Image (cartoon, coloured by chain):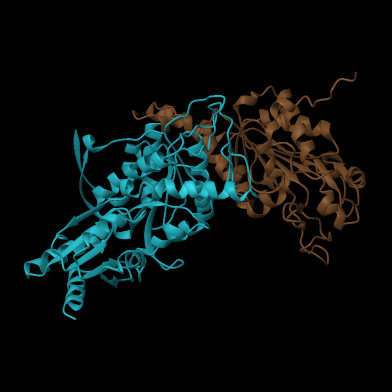
Chain colours: A brown, B cyan
Amino acid sequence: MAEEKTNRFLPYLREDRLPHIFCPGCGNGAVMNAFLAAMEKAEMDFDNMTLVSGIGCSSRIPGYLKCDSLHTTHGRALSFATGLKIANKDLDVVVFSGDGDAASIGGNHLIHAARRNLNITMICINNNIYGMTGGQVSPTSPKGIVATTAPYGNYDTPFKLAELVAGAGASYSARWTTVEMENLVLSIKTALKNPGFSFVEVVTLCPTYFGRKNKLKTPTAMAAVMKANTVYKSAADRMSEKELKDKVVVGEFANKQRDELSEVLDKFSIDTYGKKTLINSAYETDF
Amino acid sequence: MSEELFIQGNEACAKGAIAAGCRFFAGYPITPSTEIAETLARELPKVGGSFVQMEDEIASMGAIIGASWGGTKSMTATSGPGLSLMQENIGYAFITETPLVIADVQRGSPSTAQPTMGAQGDMMQARWGSHGDYEPIALAPASVEEFFYFTIKAFNLAEQYRVPVFLMADETMGHMREKMVIDEDKIDIVPRKRPELTDDYLPFKHVEDGTTPMPAFGDGFKVHITGLTHDERGYPDTNNPETHSKLVTRLCNKILNNRNEISSVFTQFCDDADTVVISYGSPIRAVIEAVLKVRKEGRKVGYIKVDTPWPFPNEQVLELTEGAKNVIVVEMNLGQMYYEVDRLLKQQNNVHLLGKIGGMLPTPDEIISKIKEVEDK
């Protein structure tokens, strides 16, 4: 008799919350997989991981993982994560976000988190569309694509998130796609190990809302286009703007450590006042 | 041990926060509240706490909610425009039952209006500012010393009921300097209750008194906290009418069922009063002076100082005004708590408003004129 097949990551999931809400062909499952593989490769203590997210399809990921998880308001995940990490710097804090959540409503928090350089890893699942609300144009939607709120084609120029976050001071910033899992896993591993603000943009597929509106009928058709359009940063650096049109540039855009905020705060208190930052002090009465 | 100080209200608030066990502050500069942030930026590192200046008030609210789930008592301080920005995350704190304190040092409003002038225009925003049904707790200090002790009380109530608590001060209260005494014997700290990690542990259990103990992230409970309607496990269950109504009803009832325990007033001369003056925060100081003066003239006037605008002290106020013909509400807006008082007392008393805006406190003379106008009509 054939053995029953189970995913090796099942022990990390809240099984009582399955099935998940993701559509067939959605990249969120692939990113979850990549995250768990990277977490194992980085030898992280899963029990010490706390996940924070905002609103959107990708922000539902923390709800499926068996960790302390904070599913917050739209765009604001990084601000909650900032408080959580400073309050208890021993926690490993990971933020899951989408392109609308991170770069539109949460754009200000994104650049400030990069500037602050707290040890938080952010995985931004960029499907170039608002999926949860049914396919509206997002700040990363390529020019010209059709969305329910861009029925004549998108007029706006998209953000390049990995470059934006690198420019804002993140100590690690990279972009990969869900059609290249190996690089993605290694990049998330690097991000988890990096003691500072780390940003991994994962360009992914939304067959339901992006594909259907843009003549990419199946997930495999979308994946093929994405694969064909992927260019490594090293190659892209030698290409002209015209050649780079419609291309997804993958690679690392920042990888340089600098002072991490929670360590700086703690060190200042210890050196100046001989006081370590208190953890879990809400449960105490004697200070 | 007691300590005598001559300090500003905003400094007293910051001192109260530290005495209460607050070890995290996130905020954004805004007049007239900024000294609370400045004082805590200076003092928190000395006591093992952290201060962070966020990019805006929305982020400040988010950060203190995150810090609270990190196991640290946390607060922010702001004024009207900042409070407006915080509203969505305040609602999140209510539905996720996150204890925290928000000091609102009120200024002339709406919009940017009068940054350096006092007002009480945010009273209804503290009550209804975020969308949906919820029951807030709000305290209104009327002296520098009270700002200190009410801040401690705010943290205690936040922990006891797992809710955001508002400190509704105003510019006068924030910037006024006066003598205050810190008496350590009068400081009582309510610590957070940590739940027991059992197999059948439910983070949002419908317990009888409405408030379950709260774990910290990293404690091993592996809780899922969401602003979506959630069941007792904390899991989203958004399309089930029963789950939603059970959750929101419990959130409201844990405050409403304890209204008498939470709310408090200070009162004088109401036993024989024909007229009762009701006020809160800075204007009550002028009210007391006015009442003392008219009593010397033989008028039977009493006053009620409302220390907890929310939940409104219904029972106390109903009882204290029972024999009075007239009730006057004095506040620095064009009528906010007035409507709450009128709703409560309109079967029993004639309710009048002395509302003053512009930034100047109501004077005792203005209050005396109003009392005479109402009584001699």
> Horizontal placement of B142 versus A174: left or right?
left
Numbered circles on residues, count = 0
Residue B238 placed where, x, y %? 64, 48
Residue A242 visible: yes
> Horizontal placement of B232 versus A41: left or right?
left
Residue appearing at x 20%, y 71% in the figure = B325
Residue B119 visible: no
- Picture quadrant of residue B50: top left
> Horizontal placement of B291 versus B17: left or right?
left
Quarter of the image that includes the N terminus of chain A: top right
Q: Is B286 located above or below residue A36 in the figure?
A: below
The front one of A72 and B13 is: A72
The front one of A101 and B270 is: B270
Residue B189 placed where, x, y %? 32, 35
Residue appearing at x 75%, y 52% in the figure = A131
Quarter of the image that includes the C terminus of chain A: top left
Q: Is B81 located above or below residue A77 in the figure?
A: below
In the image, farthest residue toward the bottom: B377
Q: Is B137 located above or below residue A42 in the figure?
A: below
Residue B63 placed where, x, y %? 52, 43
Residue B229 placed where, x, y %? 59, 47
The front one of A228 and B317 is: B317
